[in-house]
């Protein structure tokens, strides 16, 4: 019987499949060492080489979910869910992700498929009760549940995320313990800390971006509410035109102007919602600049916000 030689294309495919297996092994080694980001990178490379390797895809989706990248995790799980036969773990994990992002109908469909194949699946039966409850929730109850999930997320320790030793140590020394603590810190405050550089900053920003969060987010919300409260309390005495006045019109010193730029403060009203501690947290901002700002605000009948 005559054997047909493999074509160059077939040989290349075989090499890609073999390389994907090696990358998968490297990913598992990285994961055993706690290097989640490295493992994800290796799995991404393996998936590019071999789109048919379901083991690679399942592990990739799982780690993306663990990292908090729900959108990409769902995307990979959905590809696996279209394969036949589909693994029970794919349907269950996808259902959980759908429920997390509020896609309750899709979550229920996944669980229906799972329980059709295995009617006595324990976790499937348990989770179906949660999804059914979510579907019957009123709008207000749904908002409350999302608020609870957000609160739980913000209480996650920063040590749960893969950060460099330098970044971890700096955060520890700054008493930043949770994700919520990070949202109360600005880029300027982090960069102003000793030994904290751009590389560590980018690490943290990327980690937050994966969760649709950003540095200073909680601070911005706090300042927004503080500005609203300020407008209510001073409206009778301070014209809104004064609050909307550009800080550039106050003729601050160069050092003070740079500090306000770093904090993204453009109006008098925004400046009045900041505290002394926030201003003093900016690199190279000292008591002289603080006194200058307090004096200018005082001339307008305003002052910096007092801590509660």
Image (cartoon, rainbow, N blue to C red):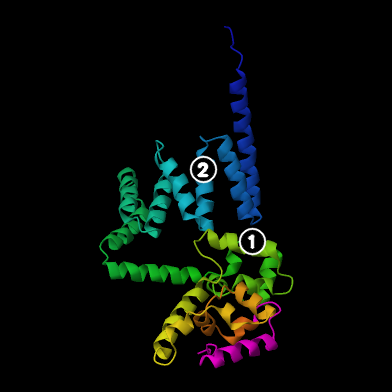
Q: Is residue 108 above or below residue 207?
A: above
Q: Residue at x 54, y 42 (%)?
A: 56
Toward which corner of the image does residue 15 lie, by quadrant? top right
The circle on residue 82 is none
User: In the figure, is residue 270 to the left or right of 200?
Assistant: left
Confirm whether the magenta stretch covers residue 198: no
Mark 2 Cα shell of 10 Å, populated few (<14), some (14-19), many (≥20): many
In the foreground, 291 or 82: 291
> Which circle's residue, 2 or 1, is located before the other in the chain?
2
**SS for tag 2?**
helix
Where in the figure is residue 159, as x and y percent of width and height? 61, 67
Q: Which residue is mark 2?
A: 57
Q: Nearer the viewer, mark 2 or mark 1?
A: 1
Q: Which residues are magenta?
A: 281-308
Screen quadrant of the N terminus: top right
Where in the figure is residue 249, as x and y percent of width and height? 57, 80
Q: Is residue 159 above or below residue 14?
A: below
Where in the figure is residue 288, as x and y percent of width and height? 69, 88
Q: Which residue is mark 1?
A: 202
> Does residue 90 appear in the picture of this structure?
yes
């Amino acid at each position: 019987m005559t054997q047909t030689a493999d074509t160059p294309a077939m040989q290349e495919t075989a090499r890609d499949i073999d390389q994907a297996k090696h990358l998968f092994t490297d990913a598992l080694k990285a994961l055993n060492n706690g290097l989640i980001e490295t493992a994800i990178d290796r799995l991404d490379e393996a998936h590019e080489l071999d789109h048919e390797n379901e083991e690679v895809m399942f592990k990739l989706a799982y780690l993306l979910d663990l990292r908090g990248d729900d959108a990409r995790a769902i995307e990979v799980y959905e590809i696996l869910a279209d394969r036949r036969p589909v693994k029970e773990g794919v349907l269950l994990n996808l259902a959980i992700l759908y429920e997390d992002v509020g896609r309750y109908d899709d979550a229920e469909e996944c669980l229906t498929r799972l329980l059709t194949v295995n009617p006595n699946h324990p976790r499937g039966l348990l989770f179906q009760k949660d999804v059914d409850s979510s579907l019957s929730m009123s709008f207000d109850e749904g908002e409350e549940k999302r608020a609870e999930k957000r609160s739980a997320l913000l209480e996650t320790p920063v040590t749960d995320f893969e950060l460099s030793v330098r970044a971890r140590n700096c955060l520890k020394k700054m008493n930043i313990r949770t994700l919520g603590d990070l949202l109360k810190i600005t880029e300027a405050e982090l960069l102003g800390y000793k030994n904290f550089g751009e590389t560590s900053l980018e690490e943290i920003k990327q980690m937050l971006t994966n969760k649709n969060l950003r540095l200073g987010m909680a601070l911005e919300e706090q300042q927004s509410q503080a500005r609203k409260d300020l407008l209510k309390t001073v409206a009778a005495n301070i014209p809104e035109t004064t609050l909307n006045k550009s800080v550039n019109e106050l003729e601050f010193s160069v050092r003070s102007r740079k500090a306000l730029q770093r904090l993204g403060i453009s109006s008098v009203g925004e400046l009045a919602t900041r505290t002394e501690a926030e201003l003093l947290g900016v690199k190279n901002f000292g008591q002289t600049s603080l006194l200058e700002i307090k004096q200018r605000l005082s001339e307008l009948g305003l002052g910096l916000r007092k801590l509660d």
